[in-house]
Amino acid sequence: EHDYPERVHILCDPYLMTTLARLCAKDTFQPAINELITTIYPNLIKIITNVEFPRRSVEIPSRMVDATPAGVYRGQILDPDTKAVVVNIARAGTVPAHICYTALNYILNPRDVRQDHIIMNRETDDQARVTGVRVGGSKIGGPIEGAYVLFPDPMGATASSMVRAIRIYKEQVEGTAPKYIAVHLIVTPEYIRRITEAHPDVEVYAVRLDRGLSAPDGLAERPGARWEREFGLNEHQYIVPGGGGFGEIMNNSYV
């Protein structure tokens, strides 16, 4: 429970929280890092599609239909004709996006599932503070009319990349998406404020809320109750407690 805008969903799922804590631990290295991400993100897709995606009533014969006319499943499933676009925000989003893309191919019609790619990185000042984001290129496979657009990005820190990526789809890509969904491991109060101000229509999902640098009175209240006293970013815009820079640790490339 929290007092942030209603489109913000902090899951606090014990299984995912346990896996994420292990992923962020100081002594966790590759290949365990990417293996743990591969464990978490399919579970996020399950949760999100259960809540956000449309359903359809079906009648599907089972293997028992040859033995009895009652061998037919009648009930609801996720509508397989739902269109989906998964956006890879390189580089931290590359592995999560591919995991989500693969998972959606199994539950939807693969012809209606697409993966796009945007290359961007933080711009910083001479004191390593984030000042913006630079887009180096993109590969967007077509319109988004009627498609659920997902942005799997592990760390929702400043929201600079996410705000820019969503703006690209809203302003430069043909069509109207029924929903934009940001899919994170961790978000900060600062991220939530910026993303909900810039894109109030976006559904934000996160396993965990990190606000480790908040004032004591901010931490004492329910999340969002004293938002102005909640902080999760250090002077270099890294999340605390967080798990370090995920672009770095996922690729074992510290530049």
Image (spheres, rainbow, N blue to C red):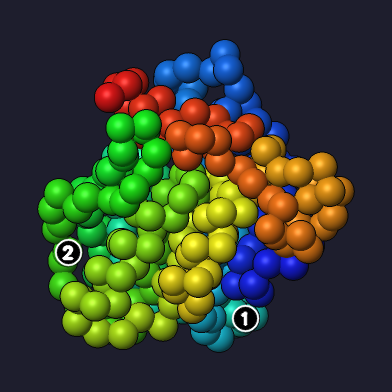
Where does residue 184 sit, x and y in percent of width and height?
51, 51
Q: Quick check: 207 above or below 240?
A: below
> Which disc is residue 75 wearing?
1
Rate crowding at label 1 as few (under 14), some (14 to 19) or many (20 or more) other CA atoms within 10 Å.
few
79 relative position to 171: left or right:
right
Quadrant housing residue 221: bottom right
What residue is rendered at 22% in x and 50% in y?
134
Q: Assign a secondary structure to mark 1.
A: strand
Amino acid, disc 1: Gly
Q: Residue at x 52, y 69 (%)?
A: 196
Task: For marks 2 and 1, give the CA distance.
Answer: 36 Å
Between 239 and 113, the one lying in front of the other is 239
Residue labelled with disc 2:
140
Q: Is residue 65 above or below residue 220?
A: below
| Pointer 2 with pointer 1, Cβ within 8 A | no
Q: Nearer the viewer, residue 68 or 60?
A: 60
User: Could you tell me which secondary element the residue under label 2 belongs to?
Assistant: loop
Q: How many marks?
A: 2
Asked whether the viewer can see residue 207, the reply is: no
Identify the mark nearer the N-term, 2 or 1.
1
At label 2, which amino acid type do we have?
Ile
Q: 10 Å neighbourhood of mark 2: few (<14), some, or many (≥20)?
A: some
In percent of width and height, residue 54 lies at: 51, 81
**Closer mark to the observer between disc 2 and disc 1:** 2
Residue at 57% x, 13% y: name it: 27
Name the spot of residue 93 as percent of width and height, x first: 35, 45
- Mark number displayed over residue 247: none
User: Residue 121: where, in percent of width, then height?
Assistant: 27, 44
Quadrant holding the N terminus = bottom right
158 to 107, vertically: above or below: above
The C terminus sits in image quarter: top left
Q: Is residue 248 above or below residue 14?
A: above
